[in-house]
Image (spheres, rainbow, N blue to C red):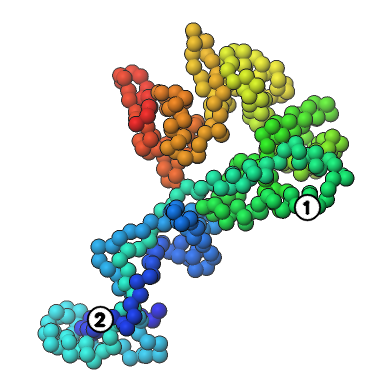
């Protein structure tokens, strides 16, 4: 927009245009975000009865409407091609602008181009970075979770081709997921990686928990049968061995990626299986089969079920179990963080239902990832819990507000 050329000592009349719009919204942004809006792209998402968000390539911002104490007028700039700027009144200068009489100011303003207000705003929009919302994503992924029935279809070479083609259209694409969630594309990709979703033929699906456990057991058994090192598992050999039993090679590679990381020292693709990933797979298998264990009994069984190279430690179970003491014996109770609500209010209600009082060391593992951007665990606790300390020699305990 051309400049208004407002100069000291050059008054101009402010007038309303023939039509004054009231449907414009002002958005307050910093220079970095303005550059992204103008040079890249942003998306505004929302539901009729929900909160609207603005998504950049890697962040999500809540849009907050803020009322202003004074009405903001939007005015037209000086007409294009009009190079004649308002002329200051005689004697006007930076130090004597207030010496002109009102009559002189009006007379001078009559000679200058008017400033025309074409719109007014009584509020504006502010941006506040917020946590992305993935509930619709998980619902869509779970509706098409890959399980044993899909593996059976993969094994059946004589199956109904039309049905298989129809099923392949059902799961969502990345764009489908992005359109239905309040999140940026980078945040969505991170969540898909975190939750273990798999992309097959350009479409995204969750992995059925029982199927993943079965495939992981088969993978570890195959490593043992072939005498492979857990730090150097050949990808081609594993896909060939499990492919003979009907397992899709794409799912085998996906399982390997969830259990470890690629080896950088081998010519052929190979995988280094992580100690914690393998230990936690076996631990969850034991806990799902029996939800309460004496700690000593669990540790003994855990070691028996693991390959010899693996080194388990009870600290790995922090976000998987609750620990209590009965008659001097430590008892583990299966209580996985992954089954708890992603909504802070509901998460705290579930936690305090399971245990009325929590020490911070026990509570913190169940709160990781629950904070909004820039929010600390301490501020989350201040909002949703009440801390108390019976005496200075004991740690703070947290209960419901």
- Indicate the quadrant where residue 110 lies: bottom left
The residue located at (49%, 11%) in the rendering is 326
User: On the picture, is 103 further left or further right than 302?
Assistant: left
At 30% from the left and 60% from the top, the residue drawn is 67
- Dot 2 and dot 1 residues touching (CB under 8 Å): no
The dot on residue 165 is: 1
Q: Residues within 10 Å of mark 2 (few under 14, many from 20)?
A: few
Residue visible at 32% across and 72% down? 120
Specify whether residue 5 is in view: no
Q: Nearer the viewer, residue 243 or 226?
A: 243
Return the x and y of residue 57 as percentages of the image width and height. Answer: 54, 57
The answer to which of marks 2 and 1 sits earlier in the sequence is 2
Q: Image height check: is 123 above or below 306? A: below
Query: Relative to residue 330, is residue 353 depicted above or below?
Result: below
Vertical position of residue 27 compared to residue 100: above or below: above
Q: CA distance from mark 2 to mark 1?
A: 66 Å
User: Callout 1: few (<14), some (14-19), or many (20+) C-alpha neighbours within 10 Å?
Assistant: few
In the rendered structure, the answer to whether residue 292 lies left or right of residue 246 reads: left
Can you give x and y, in whole percent of width and height, for residue 327 in the image?
49, 7
Tag 2's secondary structure? strand
Counting the numbered discs, the total is 2
From the viewer's side, name the closer residue of 255 and 308.
Answer: 255
Displayed quadrant of residue 76: bottom left
Snapshot quadrant of residue 386 = top left
Q: Name the residue tied to disc 2.
A: 14
Can residue 16 be seen here? yes
Name the secondary structure under disc 1: helix
Q: Percent from the top left, x then y, of residue 224? A: 80, 26
Which quarter of the rendered picture does the N terminus lie within?
Answer: bottom left
Residue furthest to the top in view is 327
Q: Position of residue 73 (x, y in %)?
A: 30, 73
On the rendered structure, is 355 left or right of 141? Answer: left
């Amino acid at each position: 927009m051309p400049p208004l050329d407002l100069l000291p000592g050059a008054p101009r009349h402010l007038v309303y245009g023939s039509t004054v719009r009231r449907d414009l919204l002002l958005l307050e942004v910093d220079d970095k975000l303005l550059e992204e809006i103008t040079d890249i792209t942003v998306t505004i998402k929302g539901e009729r009865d929900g909160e609207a968000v603005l998504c950049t390539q890697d962040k999500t911002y809540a849009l907050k409407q803020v009322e202003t104490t004074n009405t903001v007028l939007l005015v037209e700039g000086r007409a294009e091609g009009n190079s004649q700027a308002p002329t200051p009144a005689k004697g006007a200068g930076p130090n004597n602008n207030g010496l002109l009489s009102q009559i002189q100011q009006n007379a001078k303003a009559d000679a200058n181009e008017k400033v025309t207000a074409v719109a007014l705003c009584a509020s504006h929009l502010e941006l506040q970075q917020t946590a992305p919302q993935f509930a619709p994503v998980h619902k869509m992924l779970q509706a098409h979770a890959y399980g044993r029935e899909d593996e059976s279809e993969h094994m059946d070479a004589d199956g109904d081709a039309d049905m298989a083609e129809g099923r392949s259209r059902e799961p969502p694409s990345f764009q489908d997921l992005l359109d239905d969630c309040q999140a940026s594309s980078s945040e969505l990709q991170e969540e898909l990686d975190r939750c273990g979703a798999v992309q097959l033929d350009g479409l995204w699906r969750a992995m059925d928990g029982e199927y993943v456990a079965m495939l992981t057991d088969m993978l570890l058994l195959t490593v043992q049968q072939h005498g492979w090192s857990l730090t150097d598992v050949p990808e081609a050999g594993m896909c060939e061995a499990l492919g003979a039993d009907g397992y899709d090679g794409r799912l085998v590679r996906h399982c390997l990626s969830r259990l470890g990381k690629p080896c950088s020292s081998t010519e052929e693709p190979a995988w280094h299986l992580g100690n914690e990933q393998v230990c936690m797979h076996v631990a969850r298998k034991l806990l799902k089969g029996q939800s309460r264990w004496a700690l000593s009994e669990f540790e003994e069984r855990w070691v028996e079920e693991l390959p010899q190279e693996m080194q388990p430690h009870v600290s790995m179970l922090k976000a998987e179990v609750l620990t209590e003491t009965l008659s001097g014996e430590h008892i583990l109770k299966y209580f996985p963080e992954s089954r708890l609500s992603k909504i802070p209010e509901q998460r705290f209600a579930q936690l305090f239902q399971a245990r009325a009082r929590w020490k911070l060391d026990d509570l913190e593992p169940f709160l990781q990832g629950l904070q909004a951007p820039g929010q600390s665990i301490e501020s989350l606790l201040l909002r949703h819990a009440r801390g108390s300390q019976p005496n200075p020699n004991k740690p703070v305990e947290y209960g419901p507000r």
